[in-house]
Image (cartoon, coloured by chain):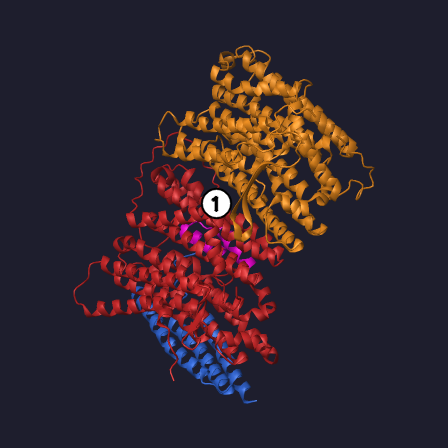
Chain colours: A orange, B red, C blue
Amino acid sequence: MDVVLAAASTPDFPAVLVAVVLTPLVGAVVLAVLPRRSSMLQPVAALFMLAAAALVAWVVVDYTAGAGGFAYLIDQSWVSRIGFSWKLGVDGISLFMLALTALLFPLATLAASPSRDRKSYFVWLLILEFGCLGVFLALDLLLFFLFFEVVLVPMYFLIGQWGHGNARRSAVKFFLFTMFGSALMLVGVLATAFLHSAAAGVPLTFDLVTIAESQVISASAARWAFLAFALGFAVKVPLAGLHTWLPDAHTDAPTAGSVILAGVLLKLGTYGFVRFGLYLFPEASRFFAPLMLTFGVVGIVYGAAVAAMQRDLKRLIAYSSVAHLGFIVLGIFALNVEGLSGGLLQMVNHGITTGALFLLVGWLYERRHTREISELGGLARPAPIMAAVFLLVTLASVGLPGLNGFVGEFLVLLGAFSSHRWWAVAATVGVILAAVYLLWAFGRVFWGRATGENAKLPDLSWRERLVVAPLLALILFLGIYPRPVLDRMEPSVEHLVQHLEEHAPSGADSARPSVGQASP
Amino acid sequence: MSPSVDWAALLPQIFLGGGSLVMLTLGTLVRKRAPWWLPNVLGIGLTLAAFGSVVWQWVRVQDPSRGAFSTIAGTVQIDGFAVFLSGVVVIAALLALVFAPFSIRRAGLPPEEFSVLLLLSAAGGVTLASANDLIVLFLGLEVLSIAAYVLAALDLRRAGSQEAGLKYFVLGAFASAFFLYGAALIYGAAGSTKLDSVAAALAAGAGSNARGMLLAGFALLLVGLFFKVAAVPFHAWTPDVYEGAPSPAVAYMAAGVKAAGFAALLRLFAGTFSASSADWRPAVAVVAVITVLAGSALGVISGDVRRLLAYSSIGHAGFILVGLESAGANGTSASLLYLGVYAFMALGSFAVVMVMGRDASGSQPLAAYDGLARRSPWLALGFTLLLLAQAGLPFTTGFWAKFEVIGAAVQSRTYWLAAVSMLGAVVAAFVYLRLVVRMYLVRPGADGDALASQKSGVGLADDSRSGDEDSDSRPPVAVPRSVGFVVAVCAAVTLFFGVWPAPLLNLAGDATLAVLGG
Amino acid sequence: MWLNQFLVLSAVLFSIGVYGVLARRNGVLVLMSIELILNAVNINLVAFGSYVQTVVGEVFALFVITVAAAEVGVGLAILLLLYRNRRSVDIHDVDMMKG
């Protein structure tokens, strides 16, 4: 493995993760004291997000590939009585989630500005970023839960106050669904911590690494705890069946809300599965893997099928998210290095492409005030740049070789195929469907003859081009040269798969021959 | 031979009870009508003094070289538990007195009577919290309750308030009678009214030859106290009383009377009867679950803010019962934390409800809150914070309260109870969201329009009028400084200790029952 | 076996009292029923007191009598207030609030 960077075993800025998490929060406080109608609101908000992004960029560059454990660890006791600590750390799994979050927030902030109550809008966005960054960095079960739950509030207000259509209903639905999921997760968190402290004979702790490495919880209890966690994550992902909040929330949210929702919030669930489901409960993960794979495949097929029937462009993309997330779940629960790295990469890719798609649809809506596919048509003529960008992003989302989506999808299928052949086959059908419906929608919207208002559609402004440019660059870069990402990811993924093999050997509970060994 | 009395142990009662009696006497002696603010200021002074003595007691009790102590022949026990709950009761009385002037001025509550009764009731609550004898427990309970009955009926101009007082009185007296009958049976079974003697007798197997009597005693005590803390199915009085009684009194009832009722429940069951916990835990578990679920579900269908908060207080009582159910030091400290934290949420919420209503009492449709965030952004923000805390959102004290209670249930391996309670919490979250939706997301049109949307029932009415900049003609809500102060204090406490819960958890953890040790 | 007779008497009184509270419409009668329960308690307390040979039971009973008097005083005052407003002490009429 070629170490590109100067090996910095002890980082020269250990508190960098604290700075990353707190920068948006400080931004929110600063923004709160600015006057209500100040013209500086958007620039200041973006400035703080960019500052956080700069810090994250430094972490990404500085992160030393090769170490399987966590870097930049901060462990500060918060409530010593219950063993709750402010423990942050980053590894190859969370690194790119972090980067994705730090990238999408400033873009979403710069992309659009609401017409009213701008101050509280940007404050909520900053608080949302604080929560999302915290979720990806927390290495304490309770801290994770706090962040996981706190993102609900800003998102609820963003959808409800600045959304379109039936925004109130969608906001409440979003809130209740997610809260329902996390309600049992809290029981799971507590049960895990108490069972661990009882079985290991140590004082109560919520430390992820300690609990996960000790593996003292009995198998049956661990399965129940896994289910409690899984329910919370499954709602967030969302797995098919628990997804009904997603199309509503996506459709009615303001543009920035949709971008963050699709790009970051959905990843909280899949990230949770990897970080907490697999790591904490390896045996239970393997036990429930077939179930989760089924959910994943059902999600792919269902999402694709329903997406094809949508007439609203935003809803179509929302359902395509259900399919893509099903794909990610498939990769994760293949439980081998290929599947997991593919799933993780796909999480990043989905964030980039779907984020870009929602941005584009948002801009389209600003211009045409409709998202009905049937009312749009021939937009490529008046707005060629928008069409080109849209096409590129769509192709990336479909998984065209040379663009980012391909690498992830390929790895996921590889991983799934080697461990669960038939699921992979079914998923491939979904991929083909995905290509069909997205390209079909693109054709309907951008090709053909433009009539009426469609003919007068203004193209992307310079500001919009600047916002979407980094995403396009990443689509190309990750498609052609994903090595830096995979290099940083792989040690952590291998570490996780080893952990799985150690505590739940792949041949143990299934008659299938084990293929997916950790073979670097 | 008269028993020795440690007057320092009784300082809060002296300030509260003695002070109120002095005020009452002076009020009848002095012919000239005192200015309206005088009784209020005196009451605030007395509660502050009581609070000071509670703090002093806390320091004394927590000093490892001195520890818990009892006085008056062991009938009054000053331990961390007693002092903590005394503190909660006193704070409830204090804050209720601070924002009461609004009701006194606007609705014409008699100022003197209000202060005197509130102080008297608080004295009862403090006595109840520190009682170590069934007789003292009974006296504390009655002083607490009788004063509260009158408080509920104090809004003399409104028939609704008298109705609330009557309902509260009839059911409260009925419950007290049950409690007494249970206390008598326990006395008969254990041969003593002193709680530590009862506990020793139970541990020694005293009840074995009179088991039926003992169980009947438990059941009757539970029924009596369930009435006081408004647990389902003994909750029927709560919404009516919360709707009819004047707001400051309701705030005190939700925060202080509830804390005192739980003081009796916790001391008797988690403390004295812990040896027979196998007998009473199932009953408490069932009641806890029904209370959480019913409180949340009834809140969903309620169309009135006061009733909604009443149902929410029922739901919270259910959570506190979950802490009691786990029957140990952890469960007790979790319940204490919940009571302390909920006191602030309830006081702040009812302060908001008070300024939102025209009268001190009476119904208040949800539509009154439409678009409050535009008219009075700070009031709406404070109320939202208090509501989200009641929903148990992270970084608020409400989360830590739920966390501790559920943690205690999980630790005692009653997973089903923890899981069902959390589901109840989600339903309850919907109830609070209904109000938040009203404040932030609903733009009121004309008044009649708002009323129409209120009639359409559940908060998810599909009437989203999406005008960009609405023109709300209603003026901002006038918030007097006293009320603003209370809301700000409650919101600040809720947020500050939500982010930094260590001192709060330590406080509740140190406040264990002397019986349980630790 | 002389204790049991008192306990039975007390239980009967208690039951009559509970029935009275639940079934009676007249507020004054409801108050009297509550008094009946309290007196059942007193019989219990005195019986137990002489059974276990301590005066605690009797002392408790004295306290109960005192408090009961205070309670009835407050109850009657509230009823009186209500009567002045409505000319009725029927507590089933009192249902302005629905919920």
Q: In terms of secondary structure, what is the magenta stretch mainly?
A: helix
Q: Position of residue B415 (x, y in %)?
A: 62, 55
Nearer the observer, C18 or A55: A55
Nearer the observer, B346 or A496: A496
At 52% from the left edge and 11% from the top edge, which residue is drawn?
A382
Q: Circle 1 is placed at which residue position?
A: B395
Q: Quadrant of residue B67?
A: bottom left
Tell me the quarter of the image containing the C terminus of chain A: top right
In the rendered image, the residue lying farthest to the left is: B32
State whether residue A440 appears in this view: no
Q: Position of residue B359 (x, y in %)?
A: 31, 52
Q: Is residue B303 magenta?
A: yes
Q: Position of residue A479 (x, y in %)?
A: 65, 20
Decide: is B407 above or below A513: below
Decide: is B6 above or below B40: below
Nearer the observer, B428 or C75: B428
Q: Amino acid at mark 1?
A: Phe
Q: Position of residue B86 (x, y in %)?
A: 40, 63
Q: Determine whether the residue tagged by mark 1 lies in a helix, strand or loop.
A: loop
| A466 left or right, relative to B33 | right
At 46% from the left edge and 53% from the top edge, which residue is drawn?
B504
Magenta span: B288-315
Judging from the image, mark 1 belongs to the subunit labelled B
